[in-house]
Image: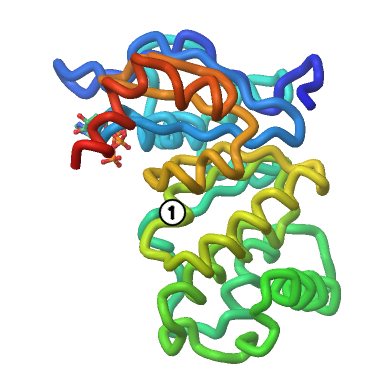
Amino acid sequence: MSSTIPRLEIDGLTVAFGGLTALDDVSFTVGEAETVALIGPNGAGKTTVFNAVCALLRPRSGTIRINGEPAPSSTTGLSARKVSRTLQGLGLFESMSVVENLLVPLSSLDLGAEQRLGKARRTLARLGLAEHARSPVASLPYPERKRVALARALVTDPRLLLLDEPAGGLGSEDIDALAETVRGLAGQGCSVLLVEHHVDFVMEVADRVVVLDFGRVVACGTPDEVRHDPAVEAAYLGLEAAA
Ligand SMILES: Nc1ncnc2c1ncn2[C@@H]1O[C@H](COP(=O)(O)OP(=O)(O)OP(=O)(O)O)[C@@H](O)[C@H]1O
């Protein structure tokens, strides 16, 4: 599954906020068309990894490479590198229609108006949102709004997709549909880095799982390997089971 040059390579990443070390020498890779899940308890550093990849903060040390090249030093460079991200808070333009939301990221691509619209409509159809194309985002229930956020991230055909808690707030039917969509991304050559608390979803879609605890990688492996790792049970899964 992985090519020799990882789609994303994080090496020795250390991030501090004042006296708090949020990430401590974190290293892992995401291969071509691979889905890697980043899990760990609240405050483990998962979002900080995303923010570092997206150039929203400056690491104290370590390197981040995308397709073998240093990651962009500002968020504006991400789309040219074919990196997309979804946000926990969705970040949609609520008063605009669904299709207009998808046209926003397409505006930076060198495409004509018809091509942009075609791309947006094909993406909406792929995610079962075609009938909502003209609806204002604010009029849709949360699961559909969440799917619009995913569609907006996918409409530019990213090679690396960062998904921040995509299953959060969804019911089991929507989670099943989401799992199918995420599994299908590999077939399109898209690599995924996923932050998620929903462990069953993670175990279903991830090729590999990286477990963070207090900013350090405490385990890394296939879902089965990680599931039976005592360090993981202690750091995360055990806490969930006890909750
Ligand atoms: N901008 C910031 N300033 C100060 N501390 C921060 C900042 N961002 C994150 N932190 C701290 O860094 C640590 C890691 O936070 P982070 O949000 O990455 O964890 P997380 O694993 O994503 O947690 P959650 O699952 O709750 O989203 C936490 O202790 C958090 O309080």
Pick whichever, 130 or 105, lies toward us: 130
User: In this orientation, does residue 61 appear?
Assistant: yes
Tell me: 32 left or right of 203. Answer: right
Q: Which residue is mark 1?
A: 87
Residue 163 place in picture, x, y as percent: 52, 47
- Tell me the quarter of the picture where residue 41 sits: top left
Of residues 215 and 201, the one drawn nearer to the viewer in this rendering: 201
Q: Residue at x 55, y 26 (%)?
A: 224
Query: How many numbered marks have been drawn onto this rendered protein structure?
Result: 1
Secondary structure state at the residue bearing disc 1? loop
Q: Residue furthest left?
A: 19
| Residue 112 placement: quadrant | bottom right
| Quadrant of the frame with the N terminus | top right
Between 112 and 102, the residue placed more toward the observer is: 102
Say what amino acid the circle numbered 1 marks.
Leu
Asked whether the viewer can see residue 217, the reply is no
Name the image quarter holding the C terminus: top left
